[in-house]
Amino acid sequence: MRGFWMLTWTEWKLYLRNPFAAFFTLIYPVMLIFLFGSIYGNEPRFAGFGTIDLSVPSYIVLIITTVGSLSLPIHLSTYRERRILRRLAVTPISPLALLGAEGLTLFAFTLSGTLLMIVAARLFYGLRFAGTITSVAVAFVLSCLALFSFGFLVASLCNSARMAQAVSFVIFFPMMFLSGAALPREILSENLRRISVIFPATPAVTLLRATWVGESLRTHLPALGGLLAVWIVSSVLASRLFRWE
């Protein structure tokens, strides 16, 4: 157990030292709040909610997607390419412990970026929240589990950091723009909205936006089921396909 926590702490420090991961997880979401807040403000326009109020849950998914579908596969594939995973394979650390430490680090990183963004939106734009902390927390945790598991699956399939980078970018950018994490799905054409359902971030956006404005999880069972399916299937496949080298 002590080895698990030491590995988690080491992974946390390594992520903080990674300028790409630190910027897009901790700083970029806050920049988006200030950018679009300065353009649109946050006056109530949509059933008592402003632009920032409705954008924050989507940006939360953007953070989760960036960490899970971009940073995680590249990070683990780099470890494999540099034979760091091979060295870990001869230690008492099991693949499950490694994936657990990585997942816990990513969750802490994602939660930190989310809280920073929420605090900035609240202090400067009076962020409104009509849901319950419990329902939003459930949606947040489930979204993290689904998208992180998906990232682990991508990492398990890639043989090198370069390959992981290429695959991650091919997946990340369409998912970011079509899922509703960066742009509202309402502005997309009907055909693009149909395509967007294949991305795991789409049900995450649906669920977080719904719970943020006070809707019940029960009213969005397809999105809930979609995230559960992504989490279970990706976890099973990643655990079977994971390679140390």
Image: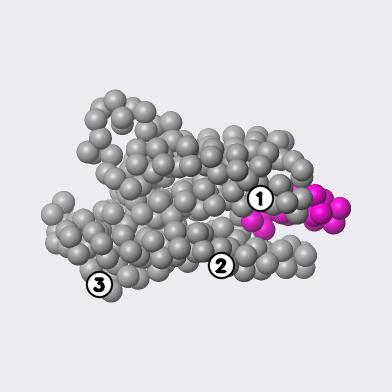
Is residue 221 shown to the viewer in this render? no
Compare marks 3 and 1 and give the one earlier in the sequence: 1
Residue 222 screen position, x and y as percent: 40, 34
Query: Which span of residues is magenta-colored?
Result: 86-102
Compare marks 3 and 2 and give the one earlier in the sequence: 2
- Distance CA(mark 2)–CA(mark 1): 16 Å
Residue at image position (56%, 63%) is 18
Q: Are marks 2 and 1 in contact (CB under 8 Å)?
A: no
Compare marks 2 and 1 and give the one earlier in the sequence: 2
Q: Nearer the viewer, residue 174 or 106?
A: 174
Residue ID for mark 3: 124
Residue at far front of view: 162
Per the image, label 1 sits on a secondary structure element best described as: helix
Where residue 176 sits, quadrant-wise, is top left
Amino acid residing under circle 2: Leu
Asked if the stretch drawn in magenta spans residue 33, the answer is no
**Quarter in which the C terminus is drawn:** top right
Q: Main secondary structure of the magenta part?
A: helix
Residue at image position (71%, 40%) is 242
Rate crowding at label 1 as few (under 14), some (14 to 19) or many (20 or more) other CA atoms within 10 Å: many
Rate crowding at label 3 as few (under 14), some (14 to 19) or many (20 or more) other CA atoms within 10 Å: few
Q: Is residue 207 left or right of residue 189?
A: right
The image shows residue 132, relative to residue 194, as above or below, that is below
Looking at the image, is mark 3 or mark 1 nearer the viewer? 1
The image shows residue 115, relative to residue 86, as above or below, that is below
Residue 121 screen position, x and y as percent: 29, 67
Q: Nearer the viewer, residue 167 or 241?
A: 167
Residue ID for mark 1: 78
Residue ID for mark 2: 16
Amino acid residing under circle 1: Thr
Amino acid residing under circle 3: Phe
